[in-house]
Image (cartoon, helix red, strand yellow):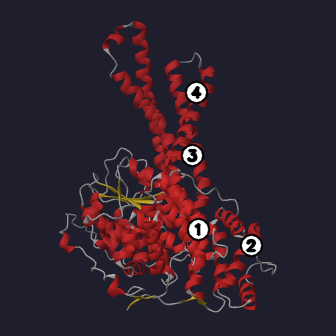
Amino acid sequence: MDFFEAQDHARRRTKWLVLWFALAVLGVVVAVNALVYVLLGQEGKIDTILPVTILTAGLILAASGFKTLQLNSGGAVVAEDLGGRLVMPGSTDFEERKLLNIVEEMAIASGVPVPQVYLMDHEEGINAFAAGTEPSNAVIGVTRGCVQRLSRDELEGVIAHEFSHILNGDMRLNMRIIGLIFGLMVISIVGRGLFEMMRFSTYTSRRDREGGGIAIAMFLLGIGLLAVGSIGVFFGRMIQAAISRQREYLADASAVQFTRNPDGIANALKKIGGLDHGNKMISAKASEASHMMFSDTGLFSFGLATHPPLDVRIKALQKHWDGNFSDSDLPPVAQDHVRPQKKSRKSQGAFGPLDLPVVSGLSALEQMGQDDRLQVSNGQKIREGLNDEWADAAHDREEAQALIFGLILAEDDQLRQGEVSFLEKNVGIDATTLARNWQAEVRGLHSSQKIALIDMALPVLRSLAPLEYERFVKVTRWLIASDAQVDLFEFMLQRVVERHLVSHFEKRGFGKVRYTKLSQLSEEANVLISTMAGVGASSEKGAKKAYADAVSELPAWQFSIASGTSLEELGKMLDRFDQSSPLVKKELLLACGRAAAADGKLANREAEMIRAIADSIGCPVPPFVETLKAA
């Protein structure tokens, strides 16, 4: 499976989603008009059609628009609506630590920023979800039953399933469905409000003939709107089922590719089947989000389940399954797999306990976007290769900022001296000392480890206060702008970090898809390909050859290697690619990769650049490592 194609397919399905929603609105409008006709009779029938239609459609559209705007803030809105509690990266609780480690490993292996994790403490069933409008504001939510009742391998299978929804583009589509479903349900919500209000109105007001008549009419209207609203609920459930069911098969298959362990996710599904309340949720908002859960929430299915039956999903994973579900009693903690304590920095060495080789560039590029390149074991080994001090720093509010400052400090001593003075004035001497120490620590890290540290730091950076965030962004921008000989990777790194934080703090996305062909961005592509050609070349001649190799597979491309582009111009070009379709992004990244790997290899610096470019345009790429061997 190709994740770029899956994302593009999910994007195209939005058009069908809008059509189904329009038909659902039409059905509800007709039902409301019929209700008004029954209540008012023949008299006034014609006069009421237009205002009732406008009022009903307007209410649905307004409610959908309101909910959609609310959801633009990211997946945290959904998690909190479902009763989730944010799990902080520094948690020492065993179950929470196990969950956080798995999420970090998955994120590192897939190349996405580490999502924030929410735990639904009051949900005893086994369920999970991924929510967000894009990887920058994605969250992973799990029930308490999920972390208590599943082994590590089973929990890995569930989390891998949710990560596949992020990578396939399902998550954004699922968020749009929530917005539309809320609009379709609003008639039912209004009806329930009227029913409850009139139900508990005082007896005195009912004795008054005029007041009593109005009360009875409102009571009947409430009942009628509840009945009509059920039509909207039905249509909403139908949309959920139509969109979700086939995507669940795809996510199960991707999870198996990710973990290389079909038994993990299959055994998790068996435990759901073996538990009396297996996947059911008590949250009042669970029905709205049923389509994005790991398994159906068990509410109001009536033949419109949002997920395939458990036995069908298990059979697809284990063809020789005997049909028996598993016992879901809480397993003793001792049965779970606990990873060995990592070595300290002193015994571990500067590069961690891993042999992280220079990879074969061409083979890695050929598999870009394929789930064959996703291996959670790579994430585990990269994560374990980071010594305790680095991981702790990425999880600490102050040290995470210093770590990022250290990564973008200039290599040149003279330039760094001015940057250090600026840091001391703006963040203090202690933070500046930390930043200088981290620069020395991580200078020689492999690209996969360096980017892993950045991704691990993002959840705690999202917990900064607004003023802290503004200061952090101001400092990183100054550090980049102050360096007249700024390193290109430093610029890309700063852009990646800011991009992921903007989505969280400023509650905005990155625009709609405006470009669906690479030819629409030929000038921008030319500059980026030229830039990559120069990253790994030792001479101007070598850069031109790398450029020529890269553009040779692009249709009707004019040879015109670019030079002298400012960072501001480069940033604007990346912004435009951020608004391109997934397939256009893939085409650009392949061309950049061919330029970098013209010699048949992707060096550490070249791999850093490709992944940084990809992440800065909203297209995370897994680490370019083919094998990871313990030292």
Residue identified by numbered label 4:
52
Number of other residues with Cα within 10 Å of mark 1, as a class: few under 14, some 14 to 19, many 20 or more = many
Identify the amino acid type marked 3: Phe
**Eye-nearest disc, 1 or 4:** 1
Identify the amino acid type marked 1: Leu
**Eye-nearest disc, 4 or 2:** 2
Residue identified by numbered label 3:
21
Give 438 or 431, whichever is nearer the viewer.
431
Give the mark nearer the N terminus: 1 vs 4: 4
Q: Are marks 4 and 3 in contact (CB under 8 Å)?
A: no
Q: Secondary structure at mark 1?
A: helix
Q: Position of residue 198 (x, y in %)?
A: 37, 21
Give the mark nearer the N terminus: 2 vs 3: 3
Q: Secondary structure at mark 4?
A: helix
Q: CA distance from mark 4 to mark 2?
A: 58 Å
Q: Residue at x 47, y 60 (%)?
A: 138
Q: CA distance from mark 1 to mark 4?
A: 59 Å
**Eye-nearest disc, 1 or 3:** 1
Q: Position of residue 405 (x, y in %)?
A: 51, 69
